[in-house]
Structure formats: C-alpha cells, structure tokens
Amino acid sequence: MNKVYTTAKEAIAGIGDGMTLMLGGFGLCGIPENSIDALVDAGIKDLTCISNNAGIDNAGLGKLLRNHQIRKMIASYVGENKEFERQLLSGELEVELIPQGTLAERIRAGGNGIPAFYVPAGYGTEVQEGKEVREFNGKMYLMELGLRADFAIVKAWKGDTKGNLIFRHTANNFNNMMAAAGMVTIAEVEELVPAGTLDPNQVHTPGIFVQRIFQGSGYIKQIEFVTTSD
C-alpha cells in the first residue's frame, strides 16, 4: 500500500461537504498548516471540526472560520479567536464546548474502540445537559461518548513512508490520539524519510493508523502572542 502523497491537495482528496474532521494542534502548536490551506483552497463547506480550539484570527482553523467553511466546532476553548467568538455569539456557528481533559479522553476512547465512559467533569453545569448521570462511590459522573471522524488530519515532525510518526515536544498534544480516531488519517510531516530509518523506540504513532502521508513545506512557526521583557 503506497501511503505517500506529493501535495496536501492530493492528500485531502475525498474530503467533502458536511464531513467530520479531527485536526491536531493546540493553539498554533502542531497544527497541520498545509492541509488547512488546502481545505481553504478546495472550498469545502459545512464541516464539523474537532480540535482543541480554532487557532487565532486568520491563522490555523481561523482561516476556515473566516471563509464560513465550518458549520460546527467541537472544542474546549474559544478565547483567543475573535471571529470564533463572534460567530458563536451571533448564532452563525454551532459550538459544542467540552472540558479539555474530557475532549482528550473522548478522542482517545474513539481511537481505542471504547463507545462510552464516565467522568466527573461538568456535573452540575451546562455540560451535563442531556447526558446520563450515574453515581460511583458516592460521586456523580457524566457519561461521555467516544469520538470518531471521517478524516483525522495530524502534523508530525518526522514520518516515514509507512506512516510511522514522531512528534516533537509539545507539538504532540492532540495529534497522537487523533491519528487513531480517524476513519482515514492524513499526516503531514516536516521531514519524510524512507521506511526503516526511524528508531522504533522513538515512534509515537505506528503506521497502521496512518493511511496518507506527505511532506509539507513553508512552515512559519508562528507564535500566538509574543511577550518580551523590557
């Protein structure tokens, strides 16, 4: 099975209107920049996007928001993106906010074939609405469902032609667990190497979870907020 694609445009082929996508990253750290740009260029719309947040204005998923290509965001954070906040408050965008740890566990559960689990986070708040509640050892828990996606799009530091991936430091974030939770997983990497090159002990995501891989380019390494001393 040849998993290697030449460009992001080729790698996202098959993603259509109305699909559910998982996109790795935390803020602008570890986001699949080339793939997001390809989705913008393709004009795919009515997407449900699962990601920790939506980047910032005009960067990361903020580009898709600006073009009104996202119908629903499933995320844990809104605050750093004014357009995200504006669309939420105006009712233009459907948003499901999930406590960050619960979001991570729902993705991990989906990738591991676990349909549901119980967590205490959100009990007694709006997060509880419409969910099954059970008591364990005198404490109340909410039932949460595992998450899957039509496509998971992740960004790695290095990958090989078999789809094995290595993430760099905090850029691992949601990428590793999302790779297992997509029906089809697309990995864009900063460096693509021949199979057998990577040390197996350093691999974070085994290639069995990755169906498509390509080497990206032009990474800016943008910082969300630059803070300097006087």
Image: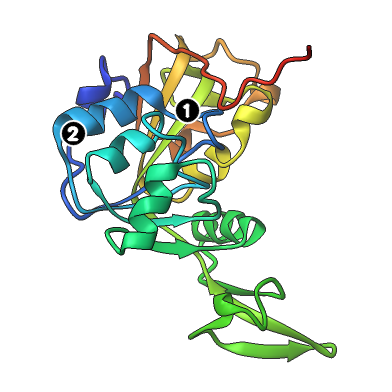
- The kind of residue tagged 2 is Ala
Question: Residue sitting at 23 percent across and 46 percent down?
Answer: 68
Q: Nearer the viewer, residue 79 or 184?
A: 79
Residue lying furthest right? 137
Image side of residue 12 versus residue 87, left or right: left
Q: Which mark is residue 193?
A: none
Q: Position of residue 4 (x, y in %)?
A: 32, 20
For label 1, the crowd category at 10 Å Cα-Cα, with few meaning under 14, some 14 to 19 and many 20 or more, is many
User: In what element is the residue under mark 2?
Assistant: loop
Question: Residue sitting at 56 percent across and 87 percent down?
Answer: 132
Q: Height in image: 56 above or below 77?
A: above
Q: Nearer the viewer, residue 89 or 151?
A: 89
Q: Which mark is residue 155?
A: 1
- Residue wearing tag 2: 13
Do labels 1 and 2 touch, CB within 8 Å?
A: no
Question: Residue sitting at 41 percent across and 57 percent down?
Answer: 148
Q: Colour scheme in the image?
A: rainbow
Q: Is residue 188 visible?
A: yes
Q: Position of residue 101 (x, y in %)?
A: 66, 57
Question: Residue sitting at 38 percent across and 61 percent down?
Answer: 89
Q: Give the spatial CA distance, label 1 vs label 2.
A: 17 Å
Q: Is residue 22 visible?
A: no
- The kind of residue tagged 1 is Lys
Mark 1 vs 2, N-terminal side: 2
For label 2, the crowd category at 10 Å Cα-Cα, with few meaning under 14, some 14 to 19 and many 20 or more, is few
Q: Nearer the viewer, residue 41 or 118?
A: 41
Q: Position of residue 95 (x, y in %)?
A: 40, 62
